[in-house]
Image: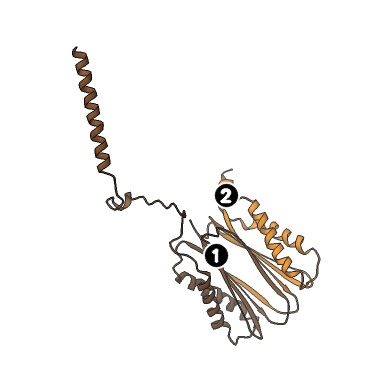
Amino acid sequence: MARAILDEGVFLADEINGIIKDSIDEAIVSSQFNHDKVTHWTNGIAEVCMKRLTNLAKPFKYIVTCVIMQKNGAGMITATSCFWDRDTDGSRTIRWENKSMYVIVTVFGIAI
Amino acid sequence: MTDSQTTTTTTGKIESLLEAHETLSASADPKPEDLPPHARVVVHTDVPYAPRCRFFPGKAKEMIGAILKEKLTGATYDADTAPMCVREITDAIKAKLKEMDLDRYKLVVQAVLGEQRGQGFQMSCRCFWDPNTDNYAHESFANDSIFCVAGAFAMYLY
């Protein structure tokens, strides 16, 4: 119980691994990269992820970014730089891939 | 007879005391300027918890664009130096944002740097925050060899 109270205002990155992975799986299932659908996928993943994060009912502001890139041998690097309270705020990045594309979802949680 | 006299005098005393108190409190209506700094109470009724200074997306967008141009003009994609390069970009953007006098703002900067080979690329973001105080800016850059998208998010701490 004491631990639950302590964790109330802290961003627990491990807790949301499942949320991110489920959101990606549900949106893409086993599709291949498709130019017409990719906008719909990125928006869908970010929206579903956000809905589930807000359902956790924790005192946080959230940012969810979703990147989808077609696989053709091209390299890609992403980096983040933050200015915040290290004790309460945090981020989690999940990389997911199939044969035709990379999906990178990053969630930032900022305590209010 | 004596009893009633005493009562009248006491009630008279109380009345005069009350009057005195009323005039005193009316005359000594405290003005915020007269109070010592620690006793002043300022009530914000229009926008509660309003930030002293705001995040201006237009200014930030210009700044991000300038940094991307400076770092990436004429650059080619190199898998070994790219991680260093993208980290420098995010750190430079964060440093510039800190100079913009964003008191009590928490900052998040994210940049994606990739190789241009004609592949499809899509990025989107969703934010759950207070639209009165928080905002974001983003800018992209591309040449024949690389593309880069950088976004900055600023969230007010109440």
Mark 1 element type: strand
- The chain to which mark 1 is attached is B
In the figure, the shade used to draw chain A is orange
- The chain to which mark 2 is attached is A
Q: Residue at x 53, y 62 (%)?
A: B134
- In terms of depth relative to the viewer, which is nearer, B1 or A94? B1
* Mark carried by residue B135: 1
Q: Is residue B107 visible?
A: yes
Which lettered chain is shown in brown?
B
Residue type (three-letter) at the residue carrying disc 2: Glu
Image height of B80 relative to B131, above or below: below
Q: Residue at x 57, y 49 (%)?
A: A8
Residue topped by disc 2: A8
Q: Quadrant of residue B86?
A: bottom right
- In terms of depth relative to the viewer, which is nearer, A24 or A1? A24
Count of numbered tags: 2
- Left or right: A21 as drawn, with respect to B25: right
Outermost bottom residue: B74
Residue type (three-letter) at the residue carrying disc 1: Asn
Outermost top residue: B1
Cα separation between marks 1 and 2: 25 Å
